Each structure stands twice: as C-alpha cells, then as structure tokens.
Image (cartoon, grey):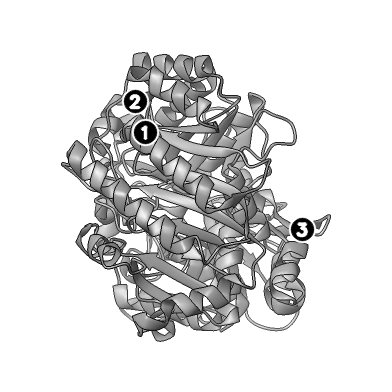
Amino acid sequence: MKTKEIFQAGLQFHHYANTAYPLTPNSFRQFQLRDAGTFSEFLRADWARADQVNLYVHIPFCQTRCRFCEYTVLENTTPADEDEYVDLLLKEIALYAPLLRGKQVIGYDMGGGTPTFLSLANLKKITAALETSFSFAADVVYSIETTPVIAAREPEKIKALFDLGYRRISMGVQTVSESLLNALGREGSTHIYERAAQNIRAAGYGSFNIDLMYGFLHQQDSELETTLKYAISLNPDHITLYRNRYKGTQLEDEAGGVSLYRIMSQYRLAYRTLKDSGYQGNIGKNTFSRIPGDYGTSDYLTHRVIEGVPYLGLGLGAQSFGTSYLAYNHGAATKAIAAYRKALTQGQLPLQDIYALPEDEAMAKMVSVAFYFGFVDEQAFQHRFGVAFRHQFTDAVTYLLAEGLMEAKEQRLYLTERGADYINGIIPLFYSKRSQREMLELMNSKGDTRSHDEQAFLKVYNLNNYQRPSLAVDAVIFHEPQAGRVQLLLIKRGAHPFMNDWALPGGFVQPDESAEQAVRRELSEEAGLVVTELKQLPLYSEAGRDPRGWIVSAPFWGTSDDSKVTFGDDAIEACWFTVQLESTEDDCLLRLSADNYELRAVCATQEPFTVKESQGIAFDHASMIIRALVASSY
C-alpha cells in the first residue's frame, strides 16, 4: 500500500478515520485475552512498567440520551439505580488499588454521561474512595463535566464540588440553535446557559470550559457562527470543538450526507472566529484557551494526548490503555449494567474485553489520539516506545513534510493549515499495516453508497438559501509534456454532489467578481495553479444538469506549462490525466488515465456533445472536455 493511497482512503472514509482508534469494536479480536483467570496478573505486570497513570471515572447517567451520543448511558434510571452504581464503582476502585500501588496519578477526569447528575453524597463517596485508594500528585487539577441545566438549577452542588477539590469544570452546550437542539434531543436556552455560567463563576472555578459541536447534517454555517459568538459571550476560559463522529449513534445514517469539505469549512470558520476573539490554539487543535500557555484541556487529557501516559478507565463501559494493552469494561457493547454488576458482585474485574497489543498497534493508538491536539511530540513518542518517531514512520513523515501537510517545530510535528483540512487522510498514515488493510476492507464492504449519501445531502440542501440562477465556472486546463500525449487537469471532489468523483476545477461565482476572475480563483484554491490565458466555451444551462437545482456553468479552457499542482479547498486530490478521444459514427469515447485511475465517458458526436454515459467524471464535464479538445485542436 502506497502512502498516497492510504491518505486518499482516509479522506474518503473520513467519518471513521479519526482520533478514535481502533476502527471498529472487532478490530483487535486476534489480540484478545480469553482466560479471565489471568487478567489480574497480566494487568499487574503491565502496570509495573509504568510510573505514572491517568484516571478517568465514567458516570453513565443523563436526563436523556442525545441522538449524537456514542457513549455508554443508562436511561430511565432512579436514585436507587444511581446508589447501586456508585457502590459497584467503589468495588471496582478497590480491586484496582493494589495493582496501581505506588503509581502517581497525574491526571483525573470524571465524565460521562453527566457526573453532576449524581447526588452530592455519591459524588463525595467516589472522590473520597479515589483519594484513599490512589496516590495523587500534589498539583493534579480535578476535572468534572456538567450540563447547563444542572449548573443553572443546582448552584449549591456546583459550589460543593469546588469545595471538594474540583477546579476545572466543562459544560456541554453543543449548539444554541433551537431547531438543532430539538433534532438532537437536547434541552437548552440562552437563559439557562447564562445562569449556568454565572453559577460556575460564583462557585470559584478558574478553569471553565464550554463544549461545542459541529459537522451535523442539519447544521448551517450561520448556526455554528451564532453558537460560537454566543459561547464566547459567556466568557469561558476555554472552548472545545467536537466534530460529530456519527459512528455508533442514532444519527449514523446521516453521516454520508456530510462531506469532508463541509467539515473543513466549519472548522475553518470556528478557528477564525475563536482566534479573532482571543482564544488561542494551534491549527488542527480542538480546544482553544484565552489563558496564555494553557492548553485548555484537563490534566488527564493533556498528559494522555501529548505524552501518551497510560490511563485507567473506571466505570460502566470505560476504556483503559495501559503500557501494552487496551481494555473495555462491561457495558461498552451492550450499554447495559447487568454484566458489570455480576462481575463486581463476584469480586472480579469488570472487563468485557482486554487486548494484549503488539507494539505497532499501541503506537497507532497513541499517535491517533495525539492529533486531538494537532501535533505529535517526537520526544514523548520515543520516551514511551524507545524508538525515534521518524524512524518508525519514515514514509509517512517524508510524504507529509513534502506535501506541506505538517511542519517540524521544536521536536514536534504540527499540522499546517492545509494539513488541518486533510487530517482524516493524515491519521491513517500512522495506523499499523494491519489496520490500514482493515480500513480499505471496510470501505470496500460498504460498497457504493453515493446514491444514499447524496440523497441525505439533498434532503437538507435548500436552493432558496442561494441566489437563482446560480452561476458557476469550470476550467478545462491542458498540459502538453515534451514527449507524450496531452494531459488534462482534474480534481477529486470532496463535497456533494458527485463526492469522490473527478471533476474540472471550478465553483460558484461570487457577487464581487467576474466569471474569469472566479475561474482563476478556483484554479488557485483547488489546484494551486495559475494560467496565463483563458478562453470561454459556450454556457451550460440545460435543465437538470446539476442535482442541486438551477445552476448555469461558464466553462473556460487554457493551457499550462506548469505540471505541479497542489490540491486544496473542496478538492481532495488534483491530478493530470492523459487524454484519449475516439470517435465513431454514433459516439465519442473519452478515456482519461492517471496512476491507478481510469475514467471514461460516452458522448454524442455533435455539438453540444451530450453525455450519454459517464464513469467517474462528474456532472456534464465530459462534454466540456470534448468541446475544449475541439476548440484547442488537440
């Protein structure tokens, strides 16, 4: 598998190729430990190799499950259910205490679910059990999560948690769009958010984070911008952006309707808005802070992401990543408590699955998570695995530096602005070879979902949001090498419609530019190309030529002496294709080939060269190409 092929596959599979690793719950089955009687000794030996540890405590209770939630959450519970769960959690803490004796806890998070859904008495029990069972470093900042509703309506609980030692609090706002909140199954209002923020500040918290989400099918850019500006007005110390991951949620069927370009553009919007308001974070990072020198994340997440410090997850469905193992507690798959209860009642560790990872998989896990911060710390990687990062990933690093997707600074490799756009292609370059093959197999097993995904996109596409008719431009650019056939520039589309098909560079004309200015801009943004002379072809205005609605295109053609192209904007690849045109009495057969790509189209032999059949060439662009070939005499 070539580096470029893996990169391209990650972009096409972007809803799965992200910081969550492995790809599926079944990815590591071959590494699974089967004999429960050996678990304790295996864990004792693994943790003996660690000096430090992070703790995460999962509280699986919420007022209601949000439709975007992928986590283990129990619904329709009673106070008695919560009391029982805390008692079980205390048993789990007691079982792990001997295994982690002497290990220094340098990060601690209580998350969920909603930890503050529990009674204050239960929260005190959990905190006391942790402090008496494990050795916390003196400077650990305890972190906890809440919802706006609880923070607004239970200020005494928020203050009591501060008095209990919690100094960082994270509140999930996600969005302030009422229509989107209803679609996601969440409760919220500006009155609640403002009261919640006031109560958190009154309690004394000096590290206040607000979580926001983007990448929803039904989320307009204007709604995201409004949410960002409103969150900023609440004056939190940090703001975290979570991209909706779809996998394992009630919204999974909508995933295909959200293009990679949509994700890119919304992150760019958020990054600019936050930066302009004083919230700092390197490009590609998810958390932004207005406190100088502060990453904005909890100690638990900071040490886990940058340094790869092993972490122990406690609670229903919690995940742990030791020095050489990955484990999931009971409930991760079923979202039910029965097996977790049974194991702890019998005095057993509540492990649903535990995997003894080969080193390349442990490396892939650490590096995938590192991209949450938009960089990889080379020294931390070498400290954990005893091998130089660039030695382990020579081909990937060489490719990323050459393509301008990452840059080296102070023993770290950072995403560039361009790299942040294409992060989903970058992360799989650090997968194990086995997991890279798995990603390709998963893509192939899903088959051609374009029709379904495009229908999901079109379902929420509203032409009334745009001026009509919309005017677009397309560019037919030829390159003639010193020896060989003429070549044609195409880009692979990163947005619906025709996502992942090949198209001519182009896009919509903006109100302040001419058609020729627009086509030059699009050539620069999508392919990094400047063309001296352009000539216009006839307009394309046939009804139904674009599934989005009434869109007219003004195509241009020209030639370029420069063969170097750099894809960008909503293009996920730019490439020169060798052109072959064959004519019969009835048809024109257009063949385009480059690397491993073979495209073809059958068109009428007379103007306007109407497209009869097309494989891999978007819209009516095959007709434009033939027209330009005729006009240029190629």
101 and 118: which is toward the camera: 101
Mark closer to the observer (1, 2): 1
- 531 vs 518: above or below: below
Q: Which numbered marker is on residue 184?
A: none
Q: Locate residue 176, reporting x and y percent.
A: 37, 25
C-alpha gap between disc 3 and disc 2? 40 Å
The residue to which callout 3 is attached is 412
The three-letter code of the residue at mark 1 reads Thr
Mark closer to the observer (1, 3): 1
The three-letter code of the residue at mark 3 reads Arg
The residue to which callout 2 is attached is 150
From the viewer's perspective, tell me whether residue 307 is left or right of residue 433. Answer: right
Furthest-right residue in view?
410
Q: Earlier in the sequence, mark 1 or mark 3?
A: 1
C-alpha gap between disc 1 and disc 3? 37 Å
- Quadrant where the C terminus sits is bottom right
Q: Locate residue 391, reporting x and y percent.
A: 76, 78
The residue to which callout 1 is attached is 116
Q: Is residue 125 visible?
A: yes
Secondary structure under the numbered disc 3 in the rendered image: strand
